[in-house]
């Protein structure tokens, strides 16, 4: 069986990428002073917002819908070659389910659970909203299982307890993602896609190691490690956890990711959440290098998906920076797109 071809989808992904917000657009958004002005600016960039006054929640919904619409277009162009996009959609679905489960454990309002999520063909906006309204991780698992979603069955095993173990739940989601994404990557016949998936697994393991080293939860040792990466071995993972704090763990992880741009994020790691955006910048830079080497290959498609995620983060920074009264200059400097 011949491996799927990427040329037309890569070309279309590059075309779609021209409609993403560039540095100057992000800078203009972070300069506005009110939510209403930001709504006007986003409407001008094609975001699906009604005319008239808007709230921060209206803007959040528009961000999700815009991102989901862009991925739907990509999926439509892929047609029956959906295997090419499996890693992209699987990663977003895993992130969404993880965020919704965390929100359920914390008892957060549905809108807060949905913040920053990106709809996919498997979990569109309506499905995400229904999941976010569930009262418990077990209810989320039951609903996913009823829909035939692969993450539902895995989640059900861990989430049905009276007091669910959040780390165990997230580990089971990560294992399911790794198995499905690796299978999808191998089916593409692309070494780049397979390496991309393996890097994703490595970075998830590294982030978990930072969290455990900081004592944010009881360490389950090797049970939290997900097989399938290419850089971070189990022994180093355990050494990072044993380092005792996130800074020391980050310094141990730096050596794993050298000489790639990913190493820089771990040099400055204060905690697991603080490095997400730096890692995203680094991954976009790595994919751009791959795209220059092979413009007709899958890098353009992977890069487009990463930049969609970066745009979501940047627009959300603008929204909540205004709501919370953050200095405009600090928002512009924090933009993910400004660093790639």
Image (cartoon, helix red, strand yellow):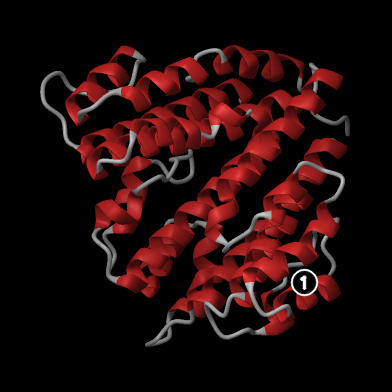
Which x, y percent locates residue 198?
A: 78, 52
Name the side, left or right, on which 22 lies relative to 264: left
Quarter of the image with the N terminus is: top right
Front position in the image: 225 or 87:
225
Residue placed at 75% from the left, 57% from the top? 202
Relative to 17, 81 lies left or right: right
Q: Name the element at disc 1.
A: helix
Between 33 and 112, the residue placed more toward the observer is: 33
Q: Which residue is drawn at 76% across and 22% down?
A: 6
Check the image and report above or below for 183 versus 317: below
Please give left or right for residue 135 compared with residue 10 in the image. Answer: left
Residue 312 image point, x, y percent:
44, 35
Residue 189 seen in render: no
Residue 227 at x, y = what percent?
A: 78, 66
Name the image quarter holding residue 101: bottom left
- Please rate how many residues cluster around mark 1, counting C-alpha atoms within 10 Å: few if below 14, some from 14 to 19, many from 20: many
Rendered image quadrant of residue 251: bottom right
Point 74% across, 26% down: residue: 288
Number of labels in the image equals 1
Taking 307 as reference, is 93 above or below it?
below
Q: Nearer the viewer, residue 31 or 227?
A: 31
Q: Residue at x 69, y 39 (%)?
A: 282
In this image, 221 relative to 229: left or right?
left
Q: Mark 1 points at which residue?
A: 237
Residue 26 in sight = yes
On screen, residue 274 above or below 168: above
Residue closer to the observer: 250 or 297: 250
- Which quadrant of the figure has residue 137? bottom left
């Amino acid at each position: 069986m011949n491996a799927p071809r990427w040329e037309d989808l890569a070309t279309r992904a590059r075309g779609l990428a021209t409609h993403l917000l560039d540095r100057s657009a992000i800078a203009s958004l972070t300069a506005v002073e009110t939510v209403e002005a930001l709504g006007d600016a986003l409407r001008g960039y094609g975001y699906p917002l009604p005319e008239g006054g808007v709230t921060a929640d209206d803007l959040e919904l528009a961000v999700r819908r815009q991102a989901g619409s862009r991925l739907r277009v990509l999926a439509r162009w892929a047609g029956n070659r959906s295997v090419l996009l499996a890693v992209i959609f699987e990663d977003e679905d895993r992130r969404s389910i993880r965020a919704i489960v965390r929100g359920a454990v914390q008892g957060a309002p549905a809108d807060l659970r949905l913040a920053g999520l990106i709809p996919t063909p498997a979990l569109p906006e309506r499905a995400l909203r229904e999941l976010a309204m569930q009262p418990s991780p077990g209810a989320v698992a039951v609903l996913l299982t009823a829909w035939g979603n692969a993450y539902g069955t895995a989640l059900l095993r861990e989430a049905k307890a009276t007091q669910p173990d959040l780390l165990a739940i997230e580990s089971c989601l990560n294992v399911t993602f790794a198995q499905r994404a690796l299978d999808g990557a191998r089916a593409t016949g692309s070494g780049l896609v397979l390496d991309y998936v393996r890097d994703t697994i490595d970075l998830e393991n590294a982030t978990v190691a930072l969290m455990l080293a900081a004592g944010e939860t009881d360490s389950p040792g090797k049970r939290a490690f997900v097989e399938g990466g290419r850089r971070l071995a189990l022994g180093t993972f355990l050494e990072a956890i044993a380092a005792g704090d996130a800074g020391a763990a980050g310094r141990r992880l730096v050596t794993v990711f050298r000489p790639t741009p990913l190493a820089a994020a771990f040099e400055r790691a204060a905690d697991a959440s603080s490095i997400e955006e730096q890692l995203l910048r680094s991954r976009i830079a790595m994919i751009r290098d791959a795209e220059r080497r092979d413009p007709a290959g899958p890098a353009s498609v992977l890069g487009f998906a990463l930049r969609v995620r970066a745009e979501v983060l940047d627009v959300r920074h603008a929204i909540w920076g205004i709501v919370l009264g953050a200095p405009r200059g600090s928002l512009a400097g924090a933009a993910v797109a400004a660093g790639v």
